[in-house]
Amino acid sequence: MIYLRESFMRDDYSLKDVDICLLGIPFDSTSISHGSRFGPAAIREALKDIEGYDSKTGLDPFEKLRIVDLGDIEIVPGSYKLTAERITDTIEWIREQNPDVFVLSLGGEHLISLPVIETLKPETVVQFDAHADLREDFIGNEYSHATWAYHIAKGFNLIQKGVRSWSREEENALKELRDNKFSSPAYLTVDIDVFDPSIAPETGLPEPSGWSFDEFCKNLNSLKKENLIGADMVEVAPSGFNSPTAFLAANVIKRILCMIAKNKR
Ligand SMILES: [Mn+2]
C-alpha cells in the first residue's frame, strides 16, 4: 500500500473524457508591479487544501465533474507574441481532442485572456475586474495587461462588472459598452483585483472598495442560465506559501465549477 496525496485536479484522466480542462499560463511580462507568474502554482496548492463539498449548493463539484489538469503552458518570458502563439496552438489542440470541454485557465497576468478568448470564440465576454483595461496602448505597448479588453471590445460582446478604476481616455470606450446585453455562448474572466484588497491583497494593482466573496457569488449567480464555455482566474501574485489570495482564488474556481456541475444535473 502506498499513501499519495490526491489532488482534486487529476492528471491521469484522458482529455477526451473530461468535462473540465485546467491549464496554467504563468506569463506576467507586461506587469508593472508584483508579478503573477506563480499564480498557477499557488492556486493549485490551495485547490488541494480547500473543502471540496460546497455547503451552500450541497454539491461537490470535484466529485461531480471530471477534471484534468494539463499543467502549465511553457510560456516565452518577455514575448507576448510568441506566448500568444503557444496559447492559441494549445487551446486549438485541446478543442480538437474534446470540442465540448470547458477550458479553465490560471494566470498569469490579464493579457493571457486575449489569445484564450480569441481561440475559444464566445459571443459574450464577462469581465469581473477592478480595472477597465480598455486603453489603446499602455506605455507605448499595444498588447498589455491594461489593453487586452480594448482588443476584446472590438470583436466580442464585452460586459464588465466590478470596474471602479479607469483613465480619462477610457471613458468613451466604457460608454460604448453600457448597452451590451448578454448572449451565449459566454466566457468569464475573473481578475482577483475585483475583490477588496482586504481579502485579496496579493495582486499587482490592488484597488480599494472591492467585492466581498458574497458579492462575487451574487454576480456569478446572474450567469447561471448562460452557456459558459470557458473561464479564467488571473492576476493572483502570491507572496509566499499558504497564500490567502490563492485560497480565495481556489474558492472562486470551486464556485464556478459548482455552477457548471449544477447545470449538468
Ligand atoms: Mn485588474
Image: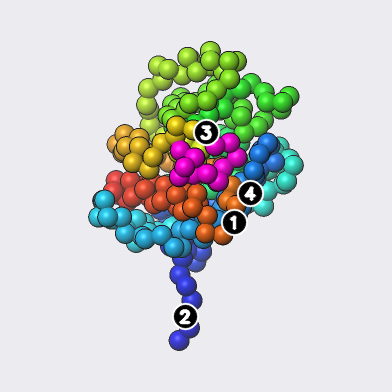
Q: Is residue 165 left or right of residue 159?
A: right
Tag count in the figure?
4
- Mark 2 vs mark 3: in front: 3
- Mark 1 vs mark 4: in front: 1
Q: What stretch is highlighted in magenta?
A: 196-207
Inspect the image, locate mark 1, and give the three-letter code of the amino acid beneath it: Gly
- N-terminal of the two: label 3 or label 4? 4
- N-terminal of the two: label 2 or label 3? 2
Does the Cβ of the disc 1 residue fall within 8 Å of ligand 1?
A: no
Which residue is disc 1 drawn over? 240
Which residue is disc 2 drawn over? 3
Which residue is disc 4 drawn over? 37
In the image, residue 216 lies at what x, y percent? 38, 39
Kind of element beneath mark 1:
loop
Does the Cβ of the disc 3 residue fall within 8 Å of ligand 1?
A: yes
Kind of element beneath mark 2:
loop
- N-terminal of the two: label 1 or label 4? 4
- N-terminal of the two: label 1 or label 3? 3
State the CA–CA distance, disc 1 to disc 4: 12 Å
State the CA–CA distance, disc 4 to disc 2: 31 Å
In the image, residue 243 lies at what x, y percent? 52, 55
Residue at the location (49% across, 40% down)?
197
Ligand 1 shows up in the quarter that is: top right
Q: In which quarter of the image is the N terminus?
A: bottom left
In this rendering, does residue 155 appear at all? no
Inspect the image, locate mark 2, and give the three-letter code of the amino acid beneath it: Tyr
Task: State if disc 3 and disc 1 touch (CB < 8 Å).
Answer: no
> In the figure, 53 relative to 256: above or below?
below
